[in-house]
Image: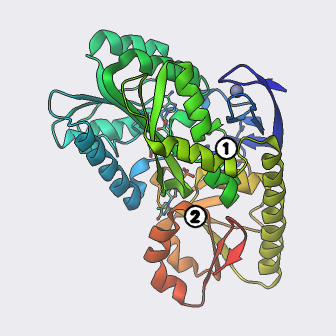
């Protein structure tokens, strides 16, 4: 039993993944001390949120050597360009407006405001990625968004027209302080828009690998609506996104300032029809994960005993959960290729699988390619179409293990 971070209620765990390393801690050497934490997940029946019971200290995950650079995906670049344009149009933003992004990473979203002369500030604690955003001319406060940063923002800037965030709010354990901070710095008619991997997609797709140290919450419309109300804010619009295997974009305003769109109640109804409000649903999820584990291990062992070659594609954070929970060793998966320079010639967290540059992928001449970045499968499968035609097969594992 543990206390819910949102509402204080007691809740129980429904899956225990065991001791896990930090998902993005790719190591320069094998024999290096690794921080581990007990990764178990629970569901709170009062506020309907799914959360990790324990989480490493945020400074152990987000620092000057953070491994994830948002702009590695062209599809995500397009996605964030559209996101920015949508906000600019709907809020009629111009050069007197102010936009703030929580977790701007390398500036993938804010660059689209900057290029239109709309004032913007990024809050980004990971210095190496923040520097990339600064190189694009974006003003970045290299700190965690927390009550102290909120005080600084209140002193230095006018109230904000649009507070934006993508794949960040679910990373912040003290989510109540985020919402209370937003309440303070948001203009009367301003909007707080954030998007995160969506609980319903995760449950439907069995995408358990979305669960790792950074993702302390898996949000639903029910739980975000609860959170907003708790802070005298109002969730008034939701919009499903295809990114990260299925995400939800939540639009929040001050209470009473906006007409609540029918999308909110409709989505809550869909969530209830899918039993997201029932504890029992989460136990089925665990059984599905175990089936994926058993099927994938049989497949990898068969490939090995048939002297075929399998390699991993994309050293994602998600892969850390799968590899460590399934206990996959370099013996079963000898290498993972990835495009991110910081990850090259490192070893995967926990399992020590070598990470090599993507430039070496084609010459490795594999028979099977295990796709860890399944959320970018459209982009990747299109890119590798010619190569894979030559008698090679993809292995994917959500919603089930499949060879194609
Ligand atoms: N928005 C980007 C980055 C997501 S990765 C995208 O969607 O691609 C998560 C980012 O959140 C990291 O860059 C991390 O440094 C940042 N982050 C983590 N905790 C934060 C906090 N408390 N305040 C602001 N940013 C935070
Ligand atoms: P993503 O699913 O966004 O990562 P995470 O699970 O960490 O949130 O994938 C990003 C990783 O995938 C990053 O290490 C780069 C790698 N990648 C490739 O190697 N090739 C590609 O074509 C793409 C799109 C990503
Ligand atoms: Zn709760």
Of residue 273 and residue 125, the one placed in the foreground of this image is 273
Kindly state the secondary structure of the residue where label 2 is placed.
Answer: helix
Image quadrant assignment for residue 90? top left
* 284 is higher (above) or lower (below) than 372: above
| Residue 30, percent from left and from top | 70, 49
Using the image as rendered, state which of residue 140 and residue 339 is in the foreground. Answer: 140
Q: Which mark is residue 339?
A: none
Residue 212 numbered mark, or none: 1
Name the residue tied to disc 2: 374
Mark 1: is the Cβ under 8 angstroms from ligand 2? yes
Residue name at image x 61 percent, y 27 percent: 173
User: Which quadrant would the N terminus be assigned to in this image?
Assistant: top right
In the figure, 210 relative to 339: above or below?
above
* x then y, percent, for residue 227: 57, 26
Q: Residues within 10 Å of mark 1 (few under 14, many from 20)?
A: many
Under 8 Å from ligand 2: the CB of mark 2? Answer: yes
Q: Report the side of 114 relative to 266 (left or right).
A: left
Q: Can the viewer see residue 322?
A: yes
327 vs 118, nearest the viewer: 118
Query: With 348 as the anchor, is 359 left or right in this view?
Result: left
The quadrant where residue 279 appears: top right
Sequence-wise, the earlier of marks 2 and 1 is 1
Q: Give the x, y percent position of residue 389.
A: 53, 88
How much space separates mark 2 and mark 1, taking CA atoms? 16 Å
Helix, strand or loop at mark 1 = loop
- Please name the residue shown 49% across and 50% down the image: 342
Q: Position of residue 169 (x, y in %)?
A: 52, 33
Q: Is residue 189 above or below residue 381?
A: above
């Amino acid at each position: 039993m543990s206390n819910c971070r949102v509402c204080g209620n007691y809740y129980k765990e429904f899956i225990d993944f065991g001791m896990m390393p930090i998902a993005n801690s790719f190591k320069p050497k094998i024999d290096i001390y690794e921080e581990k934490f007990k990764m178990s997940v629970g569901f709170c029946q009062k506020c309907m949120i799914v959360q990790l019971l324990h989480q490493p200290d945020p400074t152990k995950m987000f620092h000057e050597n953070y491994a994830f650079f948002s702009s590695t995906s062209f599809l995500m670049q397009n996605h964030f360009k559209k996101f920015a344009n949508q906000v600019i149009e709907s809020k009629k933003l111009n050069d007197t407006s102010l936009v703030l992004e929580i977790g701007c990473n390398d500036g993938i979203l804010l660059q689209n405001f900057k290029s239109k002369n709309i004032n913007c500030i990024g809050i980004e604690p990971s210095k190496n990625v923040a520097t990339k955003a600064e190189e694009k001319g974006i003003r970045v406060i290299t700190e965690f968004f927390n009550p102290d940063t909120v005080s600084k923002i209140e002193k230095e800037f006018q109230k904000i027209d649009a507070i934006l965030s993508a794949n960040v709010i679910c990373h912040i354990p003290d989510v109540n302080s985020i919402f209370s901070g937003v309440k303070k710095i948001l203009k009367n008619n301003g909007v707080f828009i954030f998007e995160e991997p969506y609980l319903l997609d995760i449950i439907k797709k069995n995408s358990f690998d979305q669960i790792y140290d950074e993702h302390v919450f898996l949000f639903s419309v029910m739980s975000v609506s609860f959170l907003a109300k708790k802070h005298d804010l109002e969730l008034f619009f939701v919009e499903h996104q295809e990114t990260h295997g299925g995400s939800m974009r939540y639009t929040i305003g001050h209470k009473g300032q906006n007409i609540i769109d029918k999308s909110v109640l409709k989505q809550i109804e869909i969530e209830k029809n899918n039993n997201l409000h029932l504890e029992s649903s989460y136990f089925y999820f665990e059984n599905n994960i175990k089936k994926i584990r058993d099927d994938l291990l049989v497949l990898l062992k068969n490939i090995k005993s048939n002297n075929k070659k399998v390699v991993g594609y994309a050293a994602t954070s998600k892969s850390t959960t799968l590899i460590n929970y399934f206990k996959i060793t370099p013996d079963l998966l000898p290498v993972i290729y990835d495009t991110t320079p910081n990850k090259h010639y490192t070893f995967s967290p926990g399992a020590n699988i070598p990470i090599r540059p993507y430039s070496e992928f084609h010459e490795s001449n594999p028979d099977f390619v295990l796709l860890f970045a399944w959320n970018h499968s459209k982009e990747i499968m299109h890119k590798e179409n010619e190569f894979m035609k030559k008698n090679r097969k993809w292995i994917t594992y959500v919603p089930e293990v499949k060879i194609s």
